[in-house]
Image (cartoon, rainbow, N blue to C red):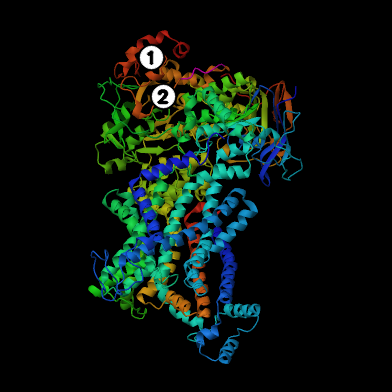
Amino acid sequence: MVPVLRMALGRLALAVPMLFVVATATFFLQQLVPGDPGSFILGKDAAPAEIRQFDVSLGLNRPVLVQYGAWLGRAVRGNLGESWTTREPVAQTLLAAAPVTLSLAGLALLVIVGLGVPLGTLAALRPGIIDRIVQASAGFAIALPNFWLGVGLVLLLAVDLKLFPATGYVSLSDPAQWLHSLVLPVLALAAGMTVSLALQVRSAMIDVLAADYIRSLRAAGLPRRSVLFRHALRNCMAPVVTTVGFQLLGLLAGAVVIEQLFNLPGLGSVMVSSVTEHDIPLVQGAVLLFAVLVVAVNLVTDVAAAVLNPRARGR
Amino acid sequence: MAQAGRLPATRAWLRALLHSPVSAVSLLWLLAVVVVSVFAPLLAPYSPVQDNLTALFQGPSLHHLLGTDELGRDVLSRLMFGGGTLLWGAAEATGVALLLGVPAGLLAGYSGGKPDRLLSWLADLSFAVPAFVVVVALAVIYPQNVVILMGALGVIAAGGVLRFTRNLTRAVRDELYVDAARVDGLTRRQILVGHVLPVISPPLVVQAFTGMSVGVIVLASLSFLGLGTNPETPNWGQLIYDASQQVTTDPWLMVPSGAVLVLTVMALNFLGSSVRDLAPGTRPGVRVRRPRRTGPGRWLPPAESAAPDESAQVPVEPSAESLLRVRDLVVAFPAPGEGRLQAVVDRVSFDLPAGQTLGLVGESGCGKTMSVLAIQGLIPAPGVIASGSVRFDGTELISASSRSVAAVRGTRIGYISQDPMTALDPSFTIGSQLREVLRRHTRAGRRVVRERSLDLLREVGIADPAATARLYPHQISGGMAQRVAIAIALSGQPDLLIADEPTTALDVTVQAEILDLLRDLKERRTMALLLVTHDLGVVADACDSVAVMYAGQIVEQGGAEDVLSNSRHPYTLGLLSSMPAATGTRARLAAIRGAVPAPRDWPVSCRFAPRCPLAADVCRVGPVALAQAGPGRLSRCVRLAELPELTAEQVLA
Amino acid sequence: MTDLLSVENLTVSFRRGSAAVDDVSLTVARSQTVGLVGESGSGKTTIGRAILGLVTPTSGRIRFDGTRPGNEAASGRGHPARRVQTAPIQTGLIQTVFQDPGSSLNPARTVGRSIAEPLAALGTASAASLRERTRELLQAVGLPADAGGRYPHEFSGGQRQRIAIARALAASPELVICDEPTSSLDLSTQAQMLNLLGDLRASRGLSYLFISHDLAVVRHMADRIVVLYRGRVMEAGPAEQVSEQPLHPYTRALRAAAPVADVARQRQRRAERQQLIKPGGDLVASGADACPYAARCVFAAPVCVSRRPRQVEVGLVQLECHRYDPDSGYPQLSCAAPTI
């Protein structure tokens, strides 16, 4: 395990400068925005003096590098500034929105892995109906945009059949309703990736099942089931984990669209609304938070892959 | 150079691509989308923004082939204008990613060292960036500017392309043909352009198609969110958004825009997977270590029924019932596209008494591996045991239930395969695999199992069993791995050990030790040994009796000493004279001419005749049966009677 | 007459502290075949690659054709040397046939293009003459002259190896390094390949550096044999002598370990090998200042693990062994000199 820990720490050490670069880039994003925030927020009709005063109050008249230093200093301490539109602390807004996105992505991940792995395994083992269904529907399912699917699901299951709510999110305080409000969004988000993962698992499993050691273990008398579950699945896991890692990143991206569609107050919605409203601090904060999530996902994926593949650990 | 222009390899698989109906259709569709959107101002019946408030929400009709939307605008026209932007945007992102990533990846992969470290760090950096989110954020500065947004996406995606290209390049760099090119004095640039690029192009093209389909979806998603849109010529993402707003009023509106988007993405995906499937087997570094001599060969028309030919098979002990008794074993595989079975093991029969060693000798494709796999019921799909009988200790295995056959594996019959490094599960330690098998065979507690595992390792000659048990297969040498494999095979105390080329992958001094070990174990545990090999020296060393196989049939059989010193078949004689040790001089070897035929080309008459220097017309008449060639000896040679008069030299002159 | 190839004190270290090739010297004369024999880890392939310029020597010199300085490396302990010149490599005078016919030909190229590459790289031939030469070479190796337009995957392993040989001959080399050219082939194909290599050598006056793990094959092809173990030369001498009357314990072990297809003789050989090979020997290694074979040697004495043996000459054979006593052969010789 020690080499794995060492690898994890190494990755973590690399992650910090990366986050730093991303943070810096998002800061300088602001410098490129045309126009100044004051006139944007107060409106073009506001008096120039008011606008200027507004800008000064935000510290926007100081040299760029000074602003950068100040921003960095605050950000490290968790202070990401205030939203220009709501005047609330960015960190607070983001923290309130995070659970929604995490619920959405988390549940979607459960569905993807929980359905995708068994489907893919079955497809690999029984080249029959299941395999054919998986392969035939794969092209279509993967090509289906999640927002289009989302609208369709809303139409069918929310509007027509009234089984699930079309929009809105219920917090975890009411677990049943929480789940209920997330069914459609999760389905829309997870459908394509489930099929995609099933295909990956299928192909990894087919490769593994053809390996020499599988045959040797069966020749040694191990029953088919334990060879399958203990050995074949185990050896499939490393490439599958890497795939799931990529899909998690896709989930974060997809969440942005799905949250908009289903009116879920998550980080994605915050992202979109802050962009349309030119609320720079909020945009910066959201991008930074997403970057942190991405780095975390990458780290976990790499460590998991190393744990699962002894050869990747180094001596 | 003689060949001009693009590589023929490219042309070959491009042509194959176009021949596949699915990819041809996909290509046509994509072309249609592009052409239609470029010429949309001429082709579309209406302007995409022309509203007609008197004809809202109309269904498909003659005037409006796909109906109208909430402002009376013609759906078909809007669709026609809406596809091009998506494809161009995706193409831009993909193009940027490839332009930045491929040359950098080539450099990083081929040069290694500092450029590699720097570029890989940059690529890793791009992985830390939440691409979609960043593109959305960029819309703050450049709203509706598809060029910039897609360009940014391309830059971020370049990191992934870089890493992908780099890994591919590294694999190619390690290939021997690159070494050969270096020996020829080719410069780095010549090697990259002439060798590396052509080989990595197919996977890169697949990546490009994947990138395109992701790009289309990303741009459509952005447009759905209201970013990167163009009110004059709305793209399909916008159309879906507009439709979604009216979904309760007119759900039909969702269908056309969704359908074309899905079709386009599907087309891109199909093209990608077609390229992957059709490009020549050029995946570098994926050299499966094929053991030299296994494999059922290619599948073809079924061998014809020869007359039942086996006379009594008794290589060694006529009276005792052999431990293993194989009769007329036929293993076959379906011939692809022909609906028939092609035999790869053609009526093989032999006996193996308890405690003896039988060698199955032959070159690749002769069917020896399939024969022994059949005994254990481990023929890989889609192969079948078409007919025959395998009696082990009196029990018929072929017609037995799979449960009874499974019960025999490991406990009565043990197996070791050719390549010890791939015979062990790379994800588990040696000890854990050994213990797992032991647990299966003994109902004992953990401590007993552990002790027994260490005993077994010691028995196969491993000096420090405890330390070895903690290692993973990739951490031990080939010789050690084979000992471990033997230990695993012995854990059920089998009466018969099947060893399929157990020493081929090992150094000769290690081979000697393994052969001695097997001999030792055989005596100590009173096991029979079925030894598959291509090496007649191994036969001389280890076997009591031997069966020589050629093209799915046994061509000679008998006691080892007898067969080797007094061969009664031209093939065996040929093998013996092919060995350099035989001549002892530098004279030309009396080699067998020609090559082993694939199953599809097996003649009905004597299968060795095309290569046999003794072949006469009588050999090509019909199938040849195994005949008695002496006490306990069999040979499948029509001209058997004349053989004694000819020496080996004469036979193979 | 100077030697065609002269390797002097070649050392190649990939990792600090362990040398894949350790102070190896050998020569190949014109029209001579020298066989390099060893098992895995012996360094034989690395020597071949160093001569071809694919690997940079850590120290030592490789001279080709005396008058034309070849792949010279500056000597110096532990400092990776830079290649000074690669002229003989680039003039196609040294060529190679690799072991694995599967990966020694670019699968995306026609075999004709691969065969012509060494000649095309010299830049002197026209397209037409390249085509002509390709046809000529294909015929010389026993393949149809019009096979040039096909791809490697359309050929069998043996045929691909013939193509590799054709490529090696394209630029009319003087020295061909054959790195286990027959090890991945079937027995009957191997015999054909050895015959082909022999014929080509005779008709073109080639020199071979023939690398193999199979003593019998090397004996069949070579005039001189060099036996390597863990990067050092254990024994070197005329082929017949080294393979039939080996002096070094390792060479004797190698010989005894290779089985022969005669039951009676093999029984004797087995008795011999059981006396010459220490069980579990492949799992141990010797220290730096010791004979590399000491840990496995049945004749090892204390001196063997404390000091490297010097090279001594016994007749035409060079030998590195402390225990060799020229008067009586070895002590503890319980069975006579090899009889089989």
Please give the label number shown on residue B544: 2
Q: Amino acid at mark 1?
A: Ala
Q: Nearer the viewer, residue A298 or B91?
A: B91
Q: Are the two marked residues, 1 and 2, in contact with CB atoms closer than 8 angstroms?
A: no
**Local crowd size for mark 1, using a 10 Å CA cut-off: few (<14), some (14–19), many (≥20):** some
Disc nearest the viewer among 1 and 2? 1
Residue B121 located left or right of residue A274: right
Q: Position of residue B410 (x, y in %)?
A: 36, 41
Q: Position of residue B202 (x, y in %)?
A: 47, 47
Residue B532 visible to the viewer: yes
Write down the residue under mark 1. B615
Q: Which residues are magenta?
A: B587-592
- Chain to which mark 1 belongs: B
Q: Nearer the viewer, residue A76 or B378?
A: A76
Residue A22 located left or right of residue B341: right
Q: Position of residue A186 (x, y in %)?
A: 35, 69
Q: Amino acid at mark 2?
A: Asp
Residue B370 located left or right of residue B403: right
Above or below — where is B162 with respect to C79?
A: below
